[in-house]
Image (cartoon, rainbow, N blue to C red):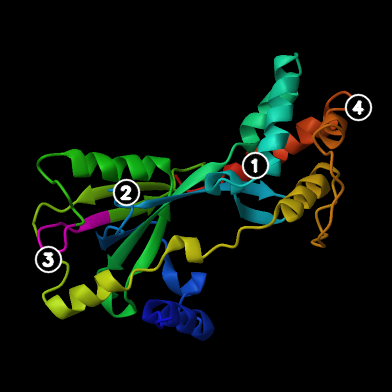
């Protein structure tokens, strides 16, 4: 079997920490305008950026990869289905919780941050609104493919918060001037050949691990991270959440509402 040099480079980056989230992920600083150049992922079914779906803010877990997007059994989807069925039967709180548990999409774009070119290609993670803005720019005949290495355009990114709000808003504007990715063709090729993959940043937990996280969250025990769980949460634990006049269900809904208020749009 021939040695896979790309796989070796990937492993070396993992061992050296070069592919850690802290080193790879980029986020615009609030109240600051930053100029970046977007790149396109190769072999991505014609789409420039990649999408990942997460379940957010369940217990102490900031984000959990959704197994269903990889064609795997998903205990969160099972719970959502159970809650939706309860909602259809008249349990309004169950239906509202099902909506809050729906996975949320995050989009990932490789970027070169102007002024920080020496740090190489970063991954910018953003939500649906920014995703739509960028795609609309690319569909505008006045701009076209802003990710093209030779005839693309830099974009200005501004993140800000409105007074009295907890979430961050982001505006993107394409610069009118066409510019190359780099004046150095060798540097541009190196960037294009060494783009980080968002799939390498997150671990997909097993069905049993996710099931236990759900059970612990529903039962109010969110400190344990041990593996192993009791099956049947969809018929027992989801029902227990709404017992007692719906107070526990309402508490979980408020918890989710408060958590989602901090997501960047």
**Disc with the residue nearer the chain's start (2 vs 3):** 2
Q: Indicate the quadrant where residue 68 lies.
A: top right
Tally of numbered discs: 4
Highlighted range, magenta: 148-156
Q: Label 4 vs label 3: CA separation?
A: 63 Å
* Label 1 environment density (alpha carbons within 10 Å; few <14, some 14–19, many ≥20): few
Q: Which mark is residue 180?
A: 3
127 lies above or below 86: below
Disc 3 crowd rating (10 Å Cα; few below 14, some 14-19, many 20+) is some
The percent position of residue 188, horizontal first and vertical second, equals: 19, 73
| Sequence-first tag of 4 and 1 | 4
* Separation of residues labelled 2 and 1 (CA atoms): 36 Å
Task: Specify whether 121 is left or right of 144.
Answer: right
Q: Position of residue 136 (x, y in %)?
A: 24, 39
Check if mark 4's residue and mark 1's residue have beta carbons within 8 Å. Answer: no
**At which x and y percent is residue 176?**
10, 51
Q: Which mark is residue 45?
A: 2
Q: Which callout, 1 or 3, points to the residue nearer the camera?
A: 3
Quarter of the image that includes the N terminus: bottom left
Of marks 2 and 4, the one in the foreground? 2
The span from disc 2 to disc 4 (Cα, nearest Å) is 49 Å
Describe the element under mark 3 as helix, strand or loop. Answer: loop
| Mark 1, residue position | 258
70 left or right of 153 in image? right
The 10 Å Cα crowd at callout 2, few under 14, some 14 to 19, many 20 or more, is few
* Residue sitting at x 54%, y 49%: 70
Q: Which residue is mark 4?
A: 244
């Amino acid at each position: 079997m021939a040695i896979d040099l790309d796989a070796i480079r990937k492993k070396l980056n993992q061992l050296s920490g070069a592919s850690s989230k802290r080193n790879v992920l980029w986020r615009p600083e609030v109240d600051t305008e930053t100029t970046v150049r977007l790149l396109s992922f190769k072999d991505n079914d014609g789409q420039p950026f990649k999408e990942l779906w997460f379940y957010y803010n369940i217990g102490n877990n900031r984000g959990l990869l959704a197994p269903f997007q990889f064609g795997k059994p998903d205990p969160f989807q099972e719970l959502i289905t159970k809650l939706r069925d309860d909602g259809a039967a008249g349990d309004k709180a169950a239906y509202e919780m099902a909506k809050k548990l729906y996975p949320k999409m995050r989009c990932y774009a490789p970027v070169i941050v102007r002024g920080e070119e020496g740090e190489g290609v970063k991954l910018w993670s953003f939500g649906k609104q920014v995703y739509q803005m960028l795609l609309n720019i690319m569909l505008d005949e006045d701009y076209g493919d802003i990710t093209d290495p030779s005839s693309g355009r830099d974009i200005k990114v501004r993140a800000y918060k409105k007074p009295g709000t907890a979430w961050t808003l982001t505006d993107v504007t394409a610069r009118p001037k066409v510019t190359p990715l780099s004046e150095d063709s060798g540097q541009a090729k190196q960037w294009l050949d060494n783009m980080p993959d968002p799939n390498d940043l997150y671990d997909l937990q097993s069905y049993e691990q996710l099931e236990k996280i759900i059970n612990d969250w529903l039962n109010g025990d969110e400190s344990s991270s041990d593996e192993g769980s009791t099956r049947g949460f969809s018929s027992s634990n989801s029902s227990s959440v709404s017992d007692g006049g719906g107070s526990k269900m309402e508490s979980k809904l408020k918890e989710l509402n408060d958590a989602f208020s901090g997501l960047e749009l």
